[in-house]
Each structure stands twice: as C-alpha cells, then as structure tokens.
Amino acid sequence: MSGRRPSLPFDPWDPAFVADPYPAYAELRARGRVHYYEPSNQWLVPHHADVSALLRDRRLGRTYQHRFTHEEFGRTAPPPEHEPFHTLNDHGMLDLEPPDHTRIRRLVSKAFTPRTVERLKPYVDGLADDLVSALVDAGGGDLLTDVAEPLPVAVIAEMLGIPESDRAPLRPWSADICGMYELNPPEETAAKAVRASIEFSDYLRDLIAERRTHPGDDLISGLIAAHDEDDDRLTEQEMISTCVLLLNAGHEATVNATVNGWWALFRNPDQLAALRADHSLVPTAVEELMRYDTPLQLFERWVLDEIEIDGVTVPRGSEVAMLFGSANHDDEVFADPERLDLTRRDNPHISFSAGIHYCIGAPLARIELAASMTALLTKAPALRLAAEPERKPNFVIRGLKGLLVEV
Ligand code: HEM
C-alpha cells in the first residue's frame, strides 16, 4: 500500500522466523539501529553496541514502579486476576531497581561468587557423569530430559535445600511462569502462570517456615538468617520471590543452552569433530555455543527518562526490546558471525546480559555447561542424533522440545 512503511523482518509468532531468526536479524540491523514495532508496542534494538549501552543506562529500568504509578507512566495496571503472578515477579531482584535491587542482590551474590561456585564443581561434575553414564547404559535417550534438565535443576534445588522428594513440580511451575516472558502472552498462558505462582509461593512459604525452626546450611536458611538479623533484611515476599527466581533462572536457560548447543554441534560436524579431538576447547566452545544460538533472545527495559538512539527519540513510558540473539550475530563485533567457531576467543557475547542485572548465575551456568559437555564427550564419544528435533514455538526462551540421541 502506498505511503505505508514496509513491515519489519521480525515476526516472533511465525514458526519459520523462530526456527532461524538470524538472517532476519541481519536485515533488521542493516535497516537501522532502532525500529518501532507496532504488534508489541516496543522499540527493537538489534545492534550489539546499542544493546550493550542500554543495559548499562540508568535512564532505563526493568520496572518503572519505583518511580511512577501505572497512570503516570501511561500504562494500565495488570488485571487483578493476574495479581499472584505479578506479586511474585515484582519482588524478585530481576524486576527490581535500586535501592531494593542492590539490597537483595548483595545478599544473594554471596552464594554465587566465582570462588563459592568453584567449590561446587566436583559435585556438578559427578552429577553430570552419573546422568551421562545412565544415558550411555540405555544406549541413548533424550538429551533434554536425561541430562540437560536434571543437572541444573538438581544443582539449584540442592543449593536452596529443596528436598529431593519435592522437586518434581519445579520444572512445570517454572515453565508455566516463564510463559509470561514471551511477547503478548495470551490469557491462557497468564492463567497457567497465576496458578503456578500461587502453588510455588505456597510451597516456599511452608518450606521457609520449616527452615525457620530447623535451619540447615542451605541458601534458604541463609536468607532467613539475613531476614531475621541483618540490616539488609528481606521481607517474606522478597524471600519467596528470590527463591522462585533462583529456581527458575537457575535452570531454564541452562537447559536450553545445553540442547541448543548440542543441536548446533550436530549441524556442524567439523566443529564437533574438532571438539572431540581436543577437549581443551570446552571453555571457548561453551561461550561460542551461547553466542551462536542465544538461549534468551530478547530482554525488555522501560524508558524512565527520554533517550535517543541514532537520532531517534524514544520517549519516557516506552518499552525497548533488546535483541540479544541479533547483538550476538553483529558483524561490527564478531568476525564471520554466522559461522560456528569453537576456537573463537574474542567473544564478548551478551547472553548473560550486562549492567546491574548481569546474570548472577553466570559462573554456575558455565560450570554446568562445561560439566555436561565434558561428560558427553568423554563417555559418549560417538554421540549422534537419533531424530530431527522439533523447536519449541517460544521466541524469547529459545529451546527444543527434545533432542533424541544414540551413543
Ligand atoms: C546459560 C544459562 C543462563 C543464561 C543464558 C542466563 C541469562 C541471564 C540474563 C540475560 C539475565 C539478565 C536479564 C536482564 O538483563 O534483563 C540473567 C539474570 C539472572 N540470572 Fe541468569 N542465566 C543463566 C543461568 C543462570 C543460573 C544458573 C542462575 C542461578 C542461580 C541464574 C540466575 C539469575 C538471576 C538471579 C538473575 C537476576 C539478576 C539481577 O537482576 O540482578 N541464571 N540471567
């Protein structure tokens, strides 16, 4: 139609786009540094330099509620029936800004320093060995359910002190809550997230009460002690929200990074062969696979004070959607970005974000990804694909429905 701007090469509801968004991202980058996208009422930012700068820019925030009411910000409050999800979500550090974010992050970060996490390495390596041995004994299986999921779930549950017998609902609760992080989630997704938020919160409220009387050496007991004693205390809601955030963030992306990574290796046999021949490539391989098929594709920020991107004014009250997958394929930063290169050393990928919300679990995720990769390379040296995998339809949280393999 004359006068109408051509539509953007971006359609997160199109399975073909989700299957391989990277060519479309290249076109989006070529067409400009910021694009208003009507279907989600967001400003898309596809370049690495801009994403990197915006993540550190205090004129943007994961929330606006510390500064404005919904009305002042030109937004409507979420419907009251979604309240349990928002109460849970809005009190976790990921959706808080300073000073609340700083207070909670300071407490939690003690459990995630590279040194503390390094001490978990033998446990994580042992777990990976056991899971992969079982897969090998069975002649193969689903890498997703047999290795990728149980490893990070067990690690984060163990750190928080969730008893083994209570762990089965953690994955479905997390999946239902994470549905809300896709663009424009439908009401059915919201209803599931609300139900999961209520059940998960109730479970943790009881567990926290139990730990208050019978403390252990787990993270929940540590947070309770801080709640009861420190100046930096957490409210009960913040404690519940922190635990849910840790449990969900603590496995969701790692699961997907594992299966996306192996799927990329199977599609690039020369790179898999090089890795098999030289296991010392594991650290750069982990980074490159997270760049090459970015497990979390998009993160949002509210514009708290007007900004300008490449001469375009983005007003207060807008929402910016930073395209991590695109930033990770930006040829202004990465040489030959569409090529999987497990030896890539200059690799400033943005998959763990940047700025104040930089992934607190990055050192742990790296240990987990390296552990499962090393165990699979060592114990299943001829691992191969048993069937073409199917992608999950989600765009933001990028994953596979399963990854069937033979040994
Ligand atoms: C491959 C695995 C992982 C990836 C790709 C990943 C990615 C991310 C990203 C992109 C953010 C920031 C989002 C933003 O800026 O808006 C983040 C934050 C966070 N991640 Fe991770 N993550 C991973 C694993 C983990 C693990 C294992 C944990 C462990 C406990 C974890 C806990 C968190 C927490 C608590 C935050 C919030 C930090 C804050 O708001 O200050 N993540 N992660």
Image (cartoon, helix red, strand yellow):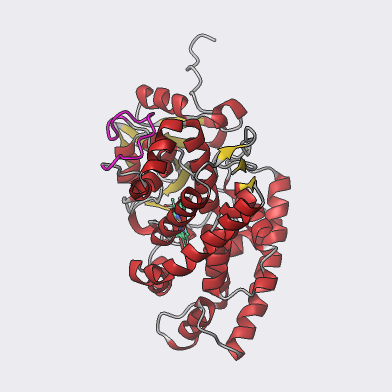
| In front of the other: 46 or 342 | 342
Q: Is residue 120 visible?
A: yes
Residue 237 drawn above or below residue 334? below
Q: Where in the figure is residue 80, as x and y percent of width and height? A: 68, 58
Relative to 19, 351 lies left or right: left
Identity of the residue drawn at 53% across and 66% down = 155
Residue 122: quadrant of the picture: bottom left
Please name the residue shown 56% across and 55% down the image. 132
Taking 399 as reference, is 103 above or below it? below
Q: Quadrant for ligand 1?
A: bottom left
| Magenta residues, dominant SS class | loop
Q: Which residues are magenta?
A: 331-345
Q: Is residue 77 above or below residue 347?
A: below
Q: Residue at x 48, y 23 (%)?
A: 8
Placement of the N terminus among the 4 image quadrants: top right
Tell me where residue 298 appears, x and y as whole percent.
Answer: 47, 42
Q: Nearer the viewer, residue 135 or 301?
A: 135
Magenta span has 400?
no
